[in-house]
Amino acid sequence: MTTFDLTGLRAVVFDTDGVVTDTARVHAAAWKHVFDGFLRGRSAPFDVPGDYLAYVDGRPRLDGVRTFLASRGISLPEGGPDDEPGAPTVHGLGRAKDELFVSEIEQHGVAAFPSTVELLHDLRRRGCRTAVVSASRHCRAMVASAGVLHLFDVLVDGTDAARLGAPGKPDPALFLEAARRLGLPPLAVGVVEDAVPGVDAARRGGFGRIVAVDRTGTRAAALLAAGADAVVSDLAEADVAGRVPVGRR
């Protein structure tokens, strides 16, 4: 079965971390550092990839704190955005993780997956529009650092989510905002995701095609159960049909 059939799709929306940029491992390492420090003497260490994939991946940062701690039977005060990084509050742990992540990408930069870049070029040559979505406020900086900002017609990120009051995944709000900016109904838009909450969000939003990326080879069943139409281990496996690339006959 063709991964992307452009006879029906007019645009494709890409999640950022783990799909466009190779930053999921940086997120996971930052979460482990923060959670392990907090959990010392309270619970077992944070497990990568198990806890990361189950409770954090694909969720807004503060939701990730709440969901993971709930899995350990731990409840913390919410606190506020001015809490010290590492303070024993939801905001404090979230700020500590954010500082670690930002420091890492500022020092070492961000790389885009070559297969994703190749797919983006192919889609755009065929007249398919593209968008990138993330709950992170750092999305634009990451995509720009990876050198692929010019390959997207639309970018929707955490700054937009805050301004719109949009809930995080599995709510489809950010994907729907991307479709709105593209001027297309969700049924004419495909979504590429690597997290179960993101696949669930695309399904709830009624998008025309949902392709999941399972780089670990461990989540295909869960991604399909959440609503993925196809699962690939890398976007090099994806094929595109339905429109002739510009300049070819």
Image: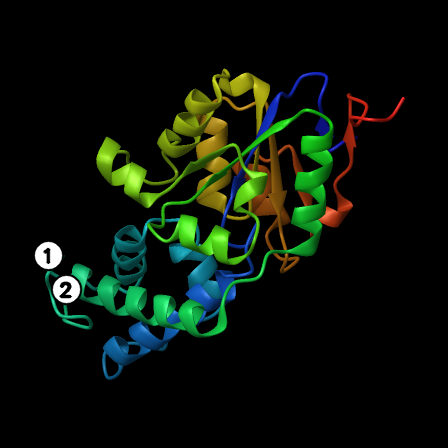
- For label 2, the SS is loop
Residue depicted at 37% across the width and 67% down the height: 101
Determine whether, in the image, residue 114 is placed left or right of residue 206: right
Can you identify the residue that label 2 sits on? Answer: 89
Residue 9 x, y percent position in the rendering: 64, 21
- Mark whose residue sits in front, 1 or 2: 1
Q: Amino acid at mark 2?
A: Thr
Q: Amino acid at mark 1?
A: Gly
Residue depicted at 14% across the width and 64% down the height: 89
Determine whether, in the image, residue 124 is placed left or right of residue 246: left
Q: Are marks 1 and 2 in contact (CB under 8 Å)?
A: yes
Residue depicted at 36% across the width and 72% down the height: 103
In the rendered image, the quadrant that contains the N terminus is: top right
> 160 or 77, which lies in front?
160
Whether residue 37 is visible here, answered yes or no, is: yes
Q: Is residue 147 above or below residue 174?
A: below
Residue depicted at 62% across the width and 52% down the height: 214
Q: Residue furthest bottom?
A: 41
Q: CA distance from mark 1 to mark 2?
A: 8 Å
Can you identify the residue that label 1 sits on? Answer: 80
